[in-house]
Image (spheres, rainbow, N blue to C red):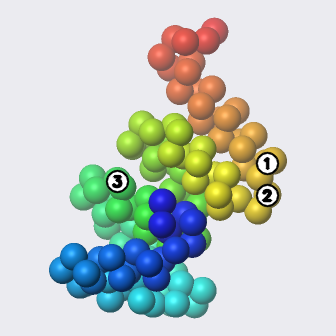
């Protein structure tokens, strides 16, 4: 949630305070720079491959890949509410992003479970 709320520095400080120094040092970077976004994206995919979905979603957020973060939350974590929360907090084009999330992801998931016809 700290990353979705754009409180990366606060999270970095918490990581350093709890002896998670590598993550804390990584979070000190300026993620407005493309090189740091690329590094975050590479880490996101590596974490996804390791089935560390929560961290993967966080790193997708750092890389400004909001739709990928939402997809990880909904499909891998099966946490639709977190996906919607991230979509609402990060989307500048809220109408289209919300509509896409609901129509393509949530409705498809409901059809798979037989909840709608």
Q: Do tag 2 and tag 1 residues touch (Cβ < 8 Å)?
A: yes
Residue 72 x, y percent position in the rendering:
45, 50
Residue 82 x, y percent position in the rendering:
50, 45
Q: Describe the element under mark 1 as helix, strand or loop.
A: helix
Judge by depth and name the residue closer to the eye, 6 or 93: 6
Say if 115 sits above or below 55 in the image.
above
Q: Is residue 38 left or right of residue 101?
A: left
Reading the image, the residue beneath label 3 is 53
N-term-proximal mark, 3 vs 1? 3
Residue 1 disc label? none
Say if 53 sits above or below 99 in the image.
below
Q: Describe the element under mark 3 as helix, strand or loop.
A: helix
Residue 38 x, y percent position in the rendering:
49, 81
Label 3 CA crowd tier, 10 Å (few <14, some 14–19, many 20+): many
What residue sits 54% from the left and 46% below the top?
83
Reading the image, the residue beneath label 1 is 96
Reading the image, the residue beneath label 2 is 93
Q: Residue extending furthest left?
A: 19
> Where, quadrant-wise, is the C terminus in this rendering?
top right
Whether residue 38 is visible, yes or no, is: no
Label 2 CA crowd tier, 10 Å (few <14, some 14–19, many 20+): few
Residue 63 x, y percent position in the rendering:
52, 74
Q: CA distance from mark 2 to mark 1?
A: 6 Å
Q: CA distance from mark 3 to mark 2?
A: 25 Å
What residue sits 46% from the left and 82% below the top?
9
What residue sits 77% from the left and 52% below the top?
94
Q: Is residue 53 left or right of residue 63?
A: left
Q: Do tag 3 and tag 2 residues touch (Cβ < 8 Å)?
A: no
Q: Is residue 107 left or right of residue 51?
A: right
N-term-proximal mark, 3 vs 2? 3
Whether residue 56 is visible, yes or no, is: yes
């Amino acid at each position: 949630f700290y990353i979705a709320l754009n409180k990366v520095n606060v999270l970095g400080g918490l990581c350093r305070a709890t002896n998670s120094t590598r993550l804390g040092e990584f979070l000190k970077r300026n993620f407005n720079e493309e090189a740091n976004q690329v590094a975050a994206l590479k880490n996101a995919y590596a974490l996804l491959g390791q089935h560390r979905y929560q961290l993967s979603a966080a790193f997708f957020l750092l890389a400004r890949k909001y739709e990928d973060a939402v997809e990880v939350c909904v499909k891998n974590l099966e946490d639709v509410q977190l996906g919607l929360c991230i979509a609402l907090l990060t989307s500048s084009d809220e109408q289209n992003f919300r509509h896409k999330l609901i129509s393509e992801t949530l409705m498809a998931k409901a059809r798979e479970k037989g909840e709608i016809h």
